[in-house]
Image: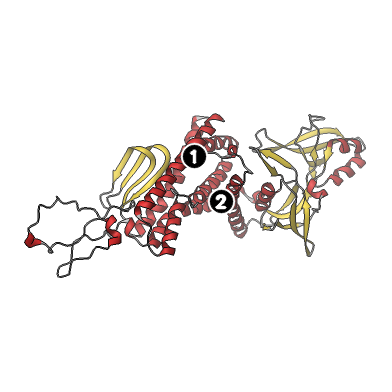
Amino acid sequence: MNVLYILLAIFIFGALIFIHELGHFLMARRCGVTVLEFAIGMGPRILSKKSAKSGTVYSLRLLPIGGFVSMLGEDGMEVAQGKQPEGEAPAETDPKQEDLLINSTEEPAKEKDESQEGDSAAPVLDEHAYCNQSVWKRILISLAGPAMNVILGFLLMFVYVLISGADSVASTQIAGFHVHYTGDAAQLGFEPGDYLHAFVEGEEGIRIRSYDQVYQKALEANGAPTDIYVQRASEDGMSFSYVLIEDVPLDVALVESLFEGSVSEKTGLKQQDVVKKVNGTRVHTYHELAYEIMNQGYRPLNLTVLRGEEEIVLEGVTFPNYTESGATFGNVDFLIYAEEDFGILTILKHTWFRSCSTVKMVYDSLFGLFTNRFGVEAVSGPIGITKTISTVARQSMLNVLYLVVVISINLGIMNLLPFPGLDGGHLMIYAIEVVRRKPMKRELEGVINFVGLVILLALAALIMIKDILTL
């Protein structure tokens, strides 16, 4: 990997971590909690500055693998001793909150004279400590970090769709079907994996939309030289190009021996069908449709389509498959109509549904891991993601932007998992507190979070080792 791509990956990770911690920081300040430190990175500090106004330390740490917001009372132990208002009786200490109290910062008092007993005020809980906030404020503070990552993902998706232009927004209406080269080796200029794109006639091409169209063209040509454009994927599969193959002796025998039509067309789909659902999952855009076919199309699907004025269910529609990282996926084998316009409403529509589809993709991936559909080779940590960023950056910076969208949403959703040590783990504990109407013992909460953190660090180390071995 090029050093520049590694620096790009570090910048992306740093920016997403910053946004995440900024969410916690802003919500903590909004809730009146004292923030002790706002840090990007882990390990020893390399840069730091303390705010004269708030007392918060802003720091940059050596290792670019995370960050944190340290708040007063976050571990449930820091409480400042308040002053007792004149003329009022000493405040009583709530036995349930005794574990929140510590001595004041003043010098230890000398042995008290018996005559002074009863004159001193009892400690008062610090209203700016995190542990003394209402459960709803603590929920908001924990939720704010992941929410910022998800919101950032949605905003960047808007930018991505806008920059990608009209070609990136497509409907769910079938415009045609792929015809692909089936030979194992190159022949006549065709290569395995080529899709027929268009016949060349005059200055304009005729878009190829079905096997029958190619067959009829072969009948007309009867062996005459024919120029054909094909769509050909790059070696890494990250992009494709259109390649002109000249003087193809097109006849029926050649078509029958070297080309094959779409599997989905043979199993029920037709041109002009508008796909509404995939196995009961509603789809609104081509991106959602393509994702559901990829995720579920390794087996026959039930598609709900609008055919003319009638909505029908096509059972057992089959798609071609491919295998990657030990898992099998479905592959789209049809053409689709573009949206009629590229106005702001269309952009917002595709931004929303593409972002929601990305959120669903995170949960589907987790489900696939737990059900053994995906193996450990499908899991990547910072090193594996850096490698992916490096590969994508060589193709297009626009694709890097999309990858940042996926990573940002992934970071937000993963942090919401109800696992100790994650924000979702804190939310789970607070949800229990809401149901029980009293907080969990601080010691127990600390043990749960510590054990969760140890497990997370162990998993991160194993994934890092796996990524290094597969470099």
Q: Is residue 119 above or below residue 451?
A: below
As drawn, is 42 to the left or to the right of 230?
A: left
Number of numbered discs visible in the structure rendering:
2
Looking at the picture, tell me which residue is in the foreground, 332 or 222: 332
Amino acid residing under circle 1: Leu
Residue 176 percent location from the top left of the image: 78, 50
Distance between the alpha carbons at the discs numbered 1 and 2:
30 Å
Amino acid residing under circle 2: Met
| Element at label 2 | helix
* Residue 180 tag number: none
| Element at label 1 | helix
Q: Is residue 145 visible?
A: no
Looking at the picture, tell me which residue is in the foreground, 219 or 90: 90
* Residue 157 tag number: 2
What colouring style does the render use?
Answer: secondary structure
Q: Which residue is mark 1?
A: 459
Q: Residue at x 28, y 48 (%)?
A: 51
As drawn, is 303 to the left or to the right of 366?
A: right
Residue 42 percent location from the top left of the image: 38, 39
Q: Residues within 10 Å of mark 1 (few under 14, many from 20)?
A: few
As drawn, is 137 to the left or to the right of 418?
A: left
Q: Residue at x 44, y 60 (%)?
A: 432
Upstream in sequence: badge 1 or badge 2: 2
Q: Is residue 133 above or below residue 70?
A: below
Q: Which circle, 1 or 2, is nearer the viewer?
A: 1
Residue 434 percent location from the top left of the image: 42, 63
Looking at the picture, tell me which residue is in the foreground, 253 or 466: 466
Q: Is residue 244 visible?
A: yes
Q: Residue at x 50, y 54 (%)?
A: 151
Residue 8 percent location from the top left of the image: 49, 37
Confirm or deny contact between disc 1 and disc 2 (CB under 8 A).
Answer: no
The quadrant holding residue 345 is bottom right
